[in-house]
């Protein structure tokens, strides 16, 4: 769950916000590769190469996927349903 305390966010955001600015400059056809590289490099350098840690990394990725869907994709889809009508 990404809801960490506000004081914990400050140090992380100081590193993340410049990265976001770099990624925003990516050409659309390269953005997915840049994102994949960034996320892979983070995981590869933070988690130890042991099954327990790698399994946790997969759990984090799964949680990120589900949270992104819940918070970003689903509300977007709900708006499009209102705008265009549901599938019948």
Image: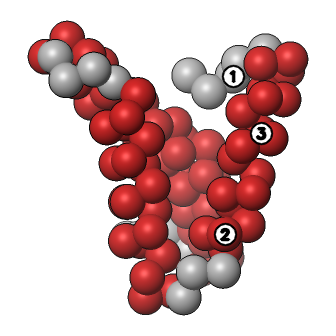
Q: Which residue is depicted at the point 75% across and 57% down?
A: 18
In depth, the one of 6 and 53 nearer the eye is 53
Q: Which residue is depicted at the point 41% across and 28% down?
A: 46
Residue that numbered label 3 is attached to: 13
Q: Is residue 13 left or right of residue 35?
A: right
- Disc nearer the start of the sequence (2/1): 1
**Alpha carbon distance from label 1 to label 3:** 13 Å
Q: SS of the residue at dot 2? A: helix
Residue that numbered label 1 is attached to: 3
Check disc 3: other Cα within 10 Å, few if <14, some if 14-19, many if 20+: few
- Disc nearer the start of the sequence (1/3): 1
Q: Quadrant of residue 33?
A: bottom left
Query: Measured along the vertical axis of the image, is residue 87 above or below residue 60?
Result: below
In depth, the one of 44 and 84 nearer the eye is 44
**Alpha carbon distance from label 2 to label 1:** 24 Å
Q: Which residue is depicted at the point 27% across and 30% down?
A: 58
Check disc 1: other Cα within 10 Å, few if <14, some if 14-19, many if 20+: few
Q: SS of the residue at dot 3? A: helix
């Amino acid at each position: 769950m990404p809801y960490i305390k506000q004081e914990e966010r400050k140090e992380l955001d100081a590193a993340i916000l410049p990265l976001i600015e770099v990624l925003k400059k990516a050409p659309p056809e390269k953005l997915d590769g840049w994102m994949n590289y960034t996320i892979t490099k983070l995981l590869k350098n933070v988690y130890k190469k042991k099954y327990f840690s790698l399994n946790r990394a997969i759990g984090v990725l799964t949680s990120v996927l589900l949270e992104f869907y819940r918070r970003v994709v689903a509300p977007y889809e709900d708006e499009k349903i209102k705008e265009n009508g549901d599938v019948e």
